[in-house]
Image (cartoon, rainbow, N blue to C red):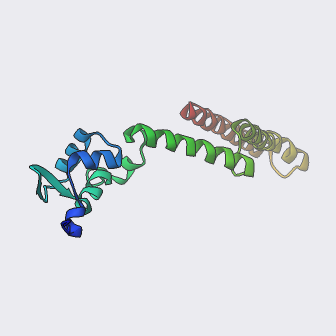
Amino acid sequence: MSKVTSIDDANAWNITRIAEAFGLHRETVRKRLRQHQVGPKGRRSGVDVYSLAEVGPALFAQDVQSKSENDIHDPRTMPPKDRKDYFQSERERLKFEGETGELIPEGEYRNDLAVTLKAVVGFFESMPDKMERLRLFTPTQLDQLESMCDEFRAELHVKVVEAGTQDD
């Protein structure tokens, strides 16, 4: 007659069987079981057997406790497969955002910024002349206005140059 095996015995496997079932090397299985402090459930035919309920989480759980939230999403700390998947998804995200108009190409951004800055600088260059034609200011006030406009343009130039060097 055949022997009836309890369900607990059916879910207790040795390291070799676990490694074959999950496509892992036996040493990898041993290492992860040790890391997660999974002990044998018993012995069968002189070999240690482990409960699958304890083995599964130990084999496939990421060691999240030792990593901060930023480390988990940092490509430099990811395993190679995850890193590849991360960069592929980022490339696809950028492509999608470009197609939907949510992402502005750098050249287009620079052109728009140049047009805006030219308009601002043009306004401040022509303001003293316009005020002189309207005769709203005295010559001393016009000189002050012109020097303030020159200071603003110089300050704007410095800020644009600083912003350009920060991006590089």
- Residue occupying the far right of the picture: 133
Position of residue 37 relative to residue 159, above or below, is below
Q: Residue at x 88, y 49 (%)?
A: 135
Q: Residue at x 65, y 34 (%)?
A: 157
Quadrant holding the N terminus: bottom left
Tell me where residue 39 appears, x and y as whole percent.
Answer: 13, 55
Residue 41 lies in quadrant: bottom left
Residue 40 lies in quadrant: bottom left
Front residue of this view, candidates 81 and 91: 81
Left or right side of 128 for 67: left
Front residue of this view, candidates 165 and 1: 1
Tell me where residue 52 appears, x and y as whole percent.
Answer: 25, 59
Q: Residue at x 37, y 54 (%)?
A: 69
Position of residue 97 relative to residue 27, above or below, is below
Front residue of this view, candidates 149 and 142: 149
Left or right side of 79 for 14: left
Asked if residue 40 can be seen in this view, the reply is: yes
Residue 3 lies in quadrant: bottom left
Quadrant holding the C terminus: top right
